[in-house]
Image (tube, rainbow, N blue to C red):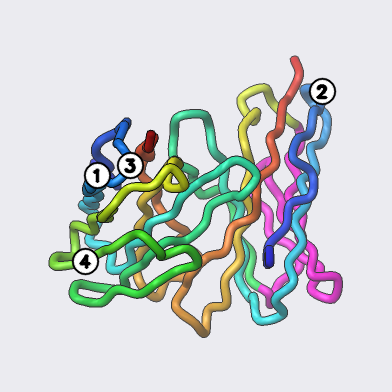
Amino acid sequence: NAGVTQTPKFQVLKTGQSMTLQCAQDMNHEYMSWYRQDPGMGLRLIHYSVGAGITDQGEVPNGYNVSRSTTEDFPLRLLSAAPSQTSVYFCASSPWGIVNYGYTFGSGTRLTVV
Amino acid sequence: DQQVKQNSPSLSVQEGRISILNCDYTNSMFDYFLWYKKYPAEGPTFLISISSIKDKNEDGRFTVFLNKSAKHLSLHIVPSQPGDSAVYFCAASHTSGTYKYIFGTGTRLKVLA
């Protein structure tokens, strides 16, 4: 099993550019989410989804869009990148309703906006 | 407003001794807690969890203690090994909601050989 796959691993963007961070999981997990990790801030929830066609905002959703057209994929879109979005982004998935399962995380995408 | 706090950014422990990592939370609705371990350039990996109906959960060298009245949980690692050197995050959720987890800021543990 590949688990949760994130691409790309590294990306440098110019301010104002757009891009999509990809996340795919092959475990048939209903729940998927995006977190960003910043020094001294821990992991903060950006957006999450409890199934195909259903998404909702987390703690820090501004500047990001998501969609969930399939169970497997949960891309994160930056419409107009800003230096404040420089961070490490993690995608995570979990079965829905099994609270003690925990999340399975991808290996992360390190994004720098210049 | 940080709902889950890890007040110690770093901790150093000698190999073979006990490591104690602490976590405090403010939201009394939280009823499920997890600990994750993170190595550099990797995603966090699930370590151990505890429900609010328990005050202790053990898995091998790892034990998590929950003190609901103090809104405090701790992770004990005994004995500590050099391979335990990593960043540890605690996370909390209220399971009547949508299983969103709020993470603490992490504690970097260094186990000295």
Membership of B78 in magenta stretch: yes
- Horizontal relation, residue A26 to residue B96: left or right: left
- Horizontal relation, residue A29 to residue A33: left or right: left
Residue ID at (76%, 46%): B21
Q: Which residue is mark 3?
A: A15
C-alpha gap between disc 3 and disc 1: 6 Å
Subunit under mark 4: A
Q: Which residue is mark 4?
A: A67
Q: Secondary structure at mark 1?
A: loop
- Horizontal relation, residue A113 to residue B110: left or right: left
Residue B101: percent from left, percent from top:
52, 65
Q: Which residues are magenta?
A: B52-79
Residue A105: percent from left, percent from top:
40, 48
Q: Earlier in the sequence, mark 4 or mark 1?
A: 1
Asked whether residue A3 is in view, the answer is no
Whether the residues at callouts 4 and 2 have beta carbons within 8 Å, the answer is no
Q: Which residue is mark 1?
A: A17
Q: Amino acid at mark 2?
A: Gln
Q: Secondary structure at mark 4?
A: loop
Q: Which residue is mark 2?
A: B14
